[in-house]
Image: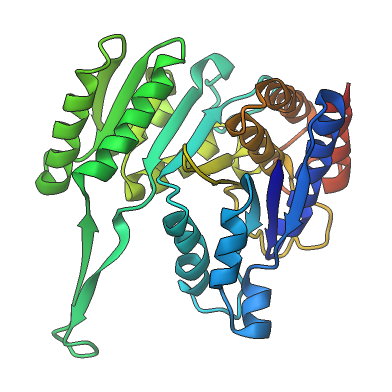
Amino acid sequence: MRIAVVGGDGTGPEVVAEAQKVLEAAAHRFGLDLGYVPMDLGGSRYLRTGEVLTDADLEQLRSVDAILFGAIGHPEVAPGVLERGLLLRIRGELDQYINLRPIRLYPGVASPVAALGPEDVDMVVVRENSEGLYAGSGRTEARGTPNEVAIQESVNTRSAIERCVRYAFELAKGRPRHLVTLVGKTNVLTYAWGLWERVTDDVAAKYPEVSLDYAHIDAACLWLVEDPGRFDVIVTDNMFGDIITDLGAAIQGGLGIASGGNINPHGVSMFEPIGGTAPGFEGTGKINPLAAIGAAAMLLAELGETEAADAVERAVAEVAGSLPSLRAGEMGLTTSAVGDRVASLVGG
């Protein structure tokens, strides 16, 4: 299996290095043949060459089995250049139409919501990853004048919604509770969410073994804090998914443990920690690599190596529960030492 490795910017290369360390431990124990394709992408390359993502880069990404991604962002690069030119373009060109975010509270990890325990937080957010407000459709009129108008349009197509919702129902079939919750805003955003609701009802009719629930986005945010146990598989659009997955990261103990995947079920998928570049922690050895290691576990699972993926997941849970804090600089161990501990557990 060939894995493209994109460290990117900030602390991205450091946490990805620990994820690779754990992948190597898994490869040794389970007899996996892993090959790595390092790729220089991110803000530093853009400042050096003026290139964000070339056609040759895309061809190389298309040729691998999966992508392990660190983080992008640079203070000298204008907002949107890397996000749209690199991340969103990869997702679009490789048709990674699902953003997948498992949200679990591991034993021994403290949630900021004191009453929550591991039995309360075990869900997956399935976020549509190609459309909505992130489609880039809109315009400004009378720019720079007192009468300026900015219009940002949410683009939603039946085909994109249907494949996203179907993925969520297929996922729910394999989970113990068999429950999908559509999170939207049908009472106000009637055009977009009217379509989402109709498509979801149509898909649900084909899955009689899976229950369907609905929550407005504002109520869902409240329940994620007060009663997260009501959720199993959440399906939602790009914008709402972006918001609630960060809230989910908070209740599971923070961004240090939050992993995500950009999934093309029939092509090349990309896996990453969702915490970003963590400015100020570069080179300090204080950043938490567990989210990147968790992303590596998701990568293995997507490639069908479930035994190895489960071993990495169990090791991440054990190490996370043993640390005094998951926050950068408060782990009691260096970045490398955390990676060593997980790799040792995975290697048996």
Q: Is residue 283 above or below residue 16?
A: below
The location of residue 44, given as percent across then percent down, is 68, 75
Q: Quadrant of residue 260?
A: top right
Q: Is residue 235 left or right of residue 193?
A: right
Point out the image quarter for the N terminus: top right
Here the colouring is: rainbow
Q: Nearer the viewer, residue 118 or 116?
A: 118
User: What residue is drawn where x is 57% and y is 62%?
Assistant: 59
User: What residue is drawn where x is 52% and y is 66%?
Assistant: 86
Point out the image quarter for the C terminus: top right
The location of residue 77, given as percent across then percent down, is 56, 78
Q: Nearer the viewer, residue 120 or 153?
A: 153
The location of residue 188, given as percent across then percent down, is 12, 45
The location of residue 199, given as percent across then percent down, is 18, 33
In the rendered picture of this protein, how many numbered marks are placed on residues? Answer: 0
Q: Is residue 283 above or below residue 243?
A: below
One can see residue 17 in this view: yes
Q: Quadrant of residue 203?
A: top left
Q: Is residue 124 above or below residue 72?
A: above
Q: Quadrant of residue 280?
A: bottom right
Q: Is residue 37 above or below residue 77?
A: above
User: What residue is drawn where x is 65% and y is 84%?
Assistant: 49
Q: Is residue 140 left or right of residue 181?
A: left
Q: Nearer the viewer, residue 151 or 264?
A: 264
Residue lying at the far bottom of the rendered structure: 145
User: What residue is drawn where x is 73% and y is 36%?
Assistant: 325
